[in-house]
Image: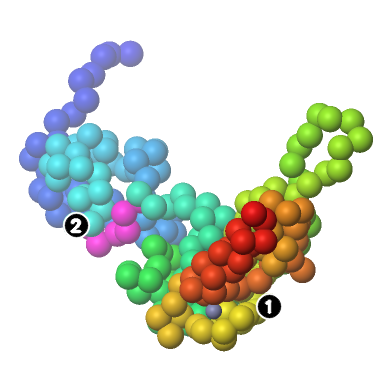
Amino acid sequence: MKYQLEPHHRNVPDEELLKDLKRVANEIGKNKVTIDEYNERGKYNNCTYNRRFGSWFTALEKAGLKKTRNLNIPDEELFNNLVEVWTSLGRQPKYNDLKRNVSKYSSGTYEKRFGGWRKALEAFVAWANEGEAPEYIKTDKKGSKARTTRNINWRLRALVLMRDGARCQLCGATPQDGVKLHVDHIKPWINGGETVLENLQILCQRCNIGKSDIELKNTY
Ligand SMILES: [Zn+2]
């Protein structure tokens, strides 16, 4: 076999490069193309695009395709973000709520991942419901009583939020009143309270601080 240099693509017009990129996207049925996907099916090579457009992302942008940077957000991360949005809104988020200043990801991201906004919420609830099983601290000591971890994981936070309706359980404040909500151990963890749904509640920042003052007084 005769050795051949890789052909030069300097004279290929931008439009032709972008056209081929779109063709590949079309072929794999996605609105984004990774470098590997392109190199496997494309007429050219990703380096040609990098040279011409400065970066792979710019090329995708020029072709009207989605950037691939955030493609691999794990479901877990999308759900965690929903917990945050839910907490800051104080209610179940609606499709149009996922604005840049409230949410790290767009409603479209959820839609695409789960096949619809409603389906995304359903997946979220199913995910949260798996969080009721307590997480225990691993201990080597024989006979020592297993304790739950102090950290309240995202699934548990979601469950508390849905149960308490994103409202302070002491004063009734919601994020619309300009307060931040926290998930609080009813019986403090440090005093033996466990990290389980029944021992958790939503408190606003003000009541939470008030509560820890009382706890401090009780402790000392
Ligand atoms: Zn409160």
Ligand 1: give its quadrant: bottom right
- Above or below, 179 against 209 in this view is below
Nearest to N terminus: mark 1 or mark 2:
2
- The kind of residue tagged 2 is Lys
User: Callout 1: helix, strand or loop?
Assistant: helix
Where residue 158 sits: x, y (%)?
62, 68
User: Callout 2: helix, strand or loop?
Assistant: helix
Q: Specify the quadrant that holds the C terminus.
A: bottom right
Where are the magenta residues, as a range? 63-68
Membership of 187 in magenta stretch: no
- Above or below, 74 against 50 in this view is below
Determine the residue positioned at 26% across, 14% down: 3
Along the viewing direction, whichever of 118 and 94 lies nearer the viewer: 94
**Residue at label 2?**
62
Along the viewing direction, whichever of 200 and 48 lies nearer the viewer: 200
Where residue 112 sits: x, y (%)?
48, 66
- The kind of residue tagged 1 is Arg
Q: Is residue 111 visible?
A: no
**Residue at label 1?**
163
Along the viewing direction, whichever of 28 and 120 lies nearer the viewer: 120
Determine the residue positioned at 79% across, 34% down: 139
